[in-house]
Amino acid sequence: MFKNIRIVMVNTSHPGNIGATARAMKNMGLQSLYLVEPKVFPSAEATARASGADDLLAQAVVCDSLDEALAECSLVVGASARLRSIAWPQLAPRECAAKVAAECVDGPVALVFGREHSGLTNAELSRCHYLVNIPTNPDYPSLNIAAAIQVIAYELRMTQEVAGVAAEKLKADDVEFATMDEVEQFYAHLEEVMVQSEFLDPAKPKFLMHRLRRLYNRARLEKQELNILRGILTAVQKWR
């Protein structure tokens, strides 16, 4: 089941953190590491820090963009220590693990971790359905990225060990969610129609698309629902 869980690291600065992450993943039985524009990789430092988990480094997928790393994923959870100006649906680590364990049974899901010093951008967060936040000491909340991944990986392991069967029951029966690449195509179509209809001024977009992304990500669009929405947009274009 864990082979469908992608750990995605975005723009990682220090190769040692990539190696430490591979070690944390292998400890907990995770296999799929995706690296989006790492500063330095491959690296001898990453291999040294992996401490025997260099097989995960050898099979890591290096991507040119976050969208590439999320292709085919039906659930994406972003990790962040910071609250955002536009609130995003949040999960505790244990809730996150249960949801990921339930949905990875049928296809790829992703857990996304941002840069060491600044985390995920708002644009990257808008690709996520949920935000997971690890409770820490408020006087010293910053976690090393590999340590944060270790916490989530541990919760996933416990979900499998203790409540794997119960977690699978959380997934709705016979529901096929749209993948992230399909959803991104919808967002591009939606923005195109809003510009054509003059509902959206591309010179003054403000936070309109960001808020719409939050709305639809919260709804977790099914493939059939997405097809209906794309059909409506196409009908509007034909009518115009």
Image (cartoon, rainbow, N blue to C red):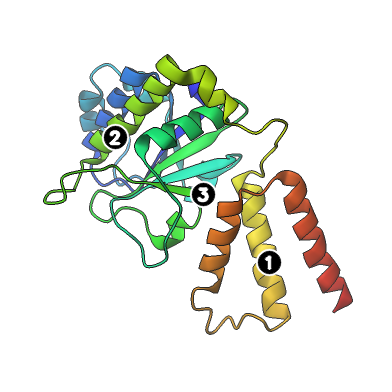
Q: Residues within 10 Å of mark 3 (few under 14, many from 20)?
A: many
Q: Nearer the viewer, mark 3 or mark 2?
A: 3
Q: Earlier in the sequence, mark 3 or mark 2?
A: 2
Q: Amino acid at mark 1?
A: Leu
Q: Residues within 10 Å of mark 1 (few under 14, many from 20)?
A: some
Quadrant in the rendering for residue 198: bottom right
Q: Earlier in the sequence, mark 3 or mark 1?
A: 3
Image x and y of residue 16, in percent: 22, 35
Q: Residue furthest left?
A: 139
Furthest-right residue in this view? 239
- Tell me, yes or no, if residue 209 can be seen here: yes
Give the tally of numbered discs.
3
The answer to whether residue 30 of the structure is visible from this angle is no
User: Residue at image x 66%, y 81%?
Assistant: 199
Determine the CA span between mark 3 and mark 2.
24 Å
Image x and y of residue 229, in percent: 75, 59
Residue designated by label 1: 190
For the point 42% across and 32% down, the residue is: 97
